């Protein structure tokens, strides 16, 4: 992936001055790809090292940043970013929403990297703190998270969700950008989800003992689409929070103590946020990011831990718990939105478990049905099958495939 020519001295000079609020002088910079090809689907990511001088102090410094930008190749990635307003959302998150959330949570809480600079004209670009310099790292997406990592994720999730409840009541305009998430109801997303359901149904026909799930999915036809989109919707009078909206493995980074014990985590990538039921983040996270063993044994533990953390955070923020769903109401809402989890498993999980390939893209999934294509590989590899062997019976137990 070639670094765009407009990722330049001018961009980084603006970023330095904006973030440090000082008259700094950029000397030079270098840029490389931040993620392997086939590991990022909605934007381009570069890691840049900036060398700059503080003229007043006559000191020289080095700073590593992540540059996130739109892709202008005119393909599906470009179209997706425009139709889902991905950069509009993420810029809104860093410039307005996070400041409001941190004001509510308190200065000791951190959910994301810091933003040095963001703009949407003439190019969509966000310059972020490089979390690897703070010893945060991503875990292998093919493996997924054990229970300890899952609990840390839902603890942070509960902090963000709780603060967003109060933020919304203080200023409802702060969630206007978040009416739709990843599964926005438009032609492109419908085509992608339909392709995913079709590929999953086809794969089931080759998995002994799982043919019935393929038949059920096929029998639903377009109804499968409608049920998935319905599960996303905010309900009038319901309990709603600002969901991250895209909690798959690569969108979370972890740090560790010197003895290897888990220390902290950060969310990255805020392009799919949606203000709706917290069940959305939970279903998507469980489907896409947990180990097989966790899916088999620990889903209820994760849900209980999230709910307890949500109550604890709201209580700390002095929010009336009488306005929060009971555990029974929370679980009822989670169960009612189970089709959202299936939709995540039938689309995003296939990307997560696929190998890193040059043809790994939304376009390949939607347009190339050949045996050698990325779609066939994504839905028929052993890693994906092992997860779906647990998830298909799990979602079927809610009665959503009948």
Image: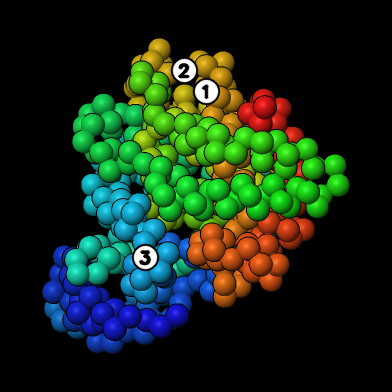
Quarter of the image with the N terminus in it:
bottom left
Which is nearer the eye, 85 or 322? 85
Q: Residue at x 63, y 63 (%)?
A: 369
Q: Earlier in the sequence, mark 1 or mark 3?
A: 3
Q: Are marks 1 and 2 in contact (CB under 8 Å)?
A: yes
Q: Residue at x 36, y 18 (%)?
A: 237
The furthest residue to the right: 208
Q: Residue at x 29, y 78 (%)?
A: 7
Q: Secondary structure at mark 1?
A: helix
Q: Position of residue 351 (x, y in %)?
A: 59, 58
Q: Earlier in the sequence, mark 3 or mark 2?
A: 3
Q: Residue 196: which numbered mark, if any? A: none
In this rendering, the answer to whether 297 lies above or below 273 is: above
Tell me the residue that label 1 is attached to: 333
Q: Nearer the viewer, mark 1 or mark 3?
A: 3
Q: Are marks 3 and 2 in contact (CB under 8 Å)?
A: no
Quarter of the image with the C terminus in it:
top right
Q: Residue at x 23, y 75 (%)?
A: 11
Separation of disc 3 and disc 2 at Cα?
Answer: 40 Å
Q: Is residue 275 left or right of residue 377?
A: left
Separation of disc 1 and disc 2 at Cα?
Answer: 9 Å
Q: Position of residue 144 (x, y in %)?
A: 65, 53
Tell me the residue that label 2 is attached to: 325
Which is nearer the eye, 190 or 124? 190
Q: Earlier in the sequence, mark 1 or mark 2?
A: 2
Q: How many marks?
A: 3
Tell me the residue that label 3 is attached to: 78
Q: Residues within 10 Å of mark 3 (few under 14, many from 20)?
A: some
Q: Nearer the viewer, mark 3 or mark 2?
A: 3
Which is nearer the eye, 84 or 363? 363
Q: Is residue 212 visible?
A: yes
């Amino acid at each position: 992936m070639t670094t765009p020519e407009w990722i330049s001295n001018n961009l980084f000079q603006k970023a330095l001055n904006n973030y440090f609020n000082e008259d700094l002088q950029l000397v030079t910079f270098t840029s490389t790809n931040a993620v392997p090809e086939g590991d990022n689907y909605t934007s381009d990511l570069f890691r840049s090292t900036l060398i700059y001088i503080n003229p007043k102090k006559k000191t020289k410094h080095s700073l590593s940043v992540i540059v996130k930008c739109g892709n202008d190749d005119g393909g599906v990635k470009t179209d997706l970013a425009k139709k889902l307003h991905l950069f509009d959302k993420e810029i809104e998150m860093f410039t307005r929403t996070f400041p409001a959330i941190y004001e509510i949570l308190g200065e000791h809480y951190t959910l994301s990297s810091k933003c040095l600079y963001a703009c949407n004209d003439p190019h969509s670009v966000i310059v972020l703190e490089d979390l690897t310099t703070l010893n945060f790292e991503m875990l292998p997406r093919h493996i997924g998270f054990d229970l300890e990592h899952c609990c840390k994720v839902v603890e942070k999730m509960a902090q963000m969700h709780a603060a967003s409840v109060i933020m919304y009541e203080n200023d409802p305009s702060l969630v206007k950008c978040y009416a739709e998430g990843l599964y926005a109801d438009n032609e492109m997303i419908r085509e992608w989800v339909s392709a995913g359901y079709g590929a999953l149904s086809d794969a089931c026909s080759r998995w002994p003992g799982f043919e019935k799930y393929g038949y059920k999915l096929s029998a639903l036809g377009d109804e499968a689409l409608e049920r998935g989109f319905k599960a996303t919707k905010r309900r009038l009078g319901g309990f709603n929070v600002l969901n991250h909206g895209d909690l798959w493995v690569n969108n979370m980074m972890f740090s560790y103590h010197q003895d290897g014990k888990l220390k902290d985590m950060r969310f990255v990538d805020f392009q799919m946020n949606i203000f709706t039921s917290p069940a959305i983040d939970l279903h998507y996270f469980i489907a896409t990011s947990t180990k097989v063993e966790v899916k088999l044994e620990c889903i209820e533990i994760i849900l209980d831990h999230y709910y307890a953390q949500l109550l604890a955070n709201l209580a700390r923020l002095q929010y009336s718990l009488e306005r929060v769903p009971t555990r029974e109401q929370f679980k009822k809402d989670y169960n009612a939105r189970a089709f959202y989890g299936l939709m995540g498993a039938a689309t995003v999980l296939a990307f997560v478990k696929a190998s890193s390939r040059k043809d790994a893209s939304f376009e390949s999934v939607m347009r190339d049905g050949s045996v050698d294509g990325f779609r066939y590989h994504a839905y028929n590899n052993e890693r994906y099958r092992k997860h779906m062997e647990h998830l298909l019976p799990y979602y079927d137990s809610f009665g959503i495939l009948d």
